[in-house]
Image: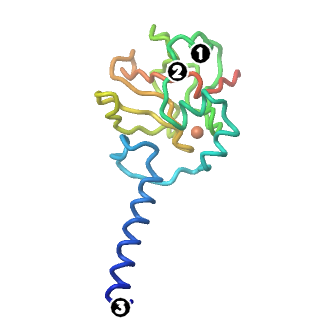
Amino acid sequence: MNRRTFLFGGTIAGTVLSLHYLNQLSPDPTLQDMATPHEFEVTKPEAEWKETLTPEQFYVLRKHGTERAGTSPLNKEYGQGKYACAGCGLPLFTSDTKFDSGTGWPSFFAPIADAVETTTDRSLFMTRTEVHCRRCGGHLGHVFKDGPKPTGDRFCMNGVSLTFIPG
Ligand code: FE
């Protein structure tokens, strides 16, 4: 192998590695337009997430799944407390912002500051704003602009991705 072939090979390998790295940063191919891609604070190989999460939690948090409407007990939970990420335990919402949206999914008009991030989700022939945990990247649901005052936002969450902590 001469020097030129060596350099060319290195460039190809570097490009492949970079693409692989970028791919790792984005949890889903439809979500690659995240404004500032970054590593999440909590990361685990898929096998480890499978060990710590129930199959339903894994499907929603790690595979951008959606639970069937009306199936989460948290949909009708109106006690005082916090709603934490079922993946990493970060508190995401408080009961003060929860409201009955009538959708069958736990809904909030605002998250706790610096708890969630959003990306544009173009899956299922729609453009929606996906919401995920700031710390582990776990998929939580979507946010829509038809919520109540004071924000007008409706954070439509999968109950399975949340853990209710009374108090
Ligand atoms: Fe999390």
Residue 100 % position (x, y): 49, 10
Above/below status of 142 relative to 32: above
The amino acid on which the numbered mark 2 sits, given as a three-letter code, is: Glu
Callouts 2 and 1 close, C-beta under 8 Å? yes
Mark 2 = which residue? 67
Nearer to us of marks 3 and 2 is 3
Q: Residues within 10 Å of mark 3 (few under 14, many from 20)?
A: few
Above/below status of 8 relative to 74: below
* Ligand 1 positioned in quadrant: top right
Q: Residues within 10 Å of mark 2 (few under 14, many from 20)?
A: many
Residue 96 % position (x, y): 55, 19
Q: On the image, which quarter does residue 162 sit in?
A: top right
Residue 19 % position (x, y): 39, 60
On screen, residue 2 versus residue 73, left or right, reads left
Q: Tell me the quarter of the image containing the C terminus.
A: top right
The answer as to whether callout 3 falls within 8 Å of ligand 1 is no
CA–CA distance in space, label 2 to label 1: 8 Å
Mark 1 = which residue? 72
Mark 3 = which residue? 3
At a point 50% along the width and 54% down the height, the residue shown is 39
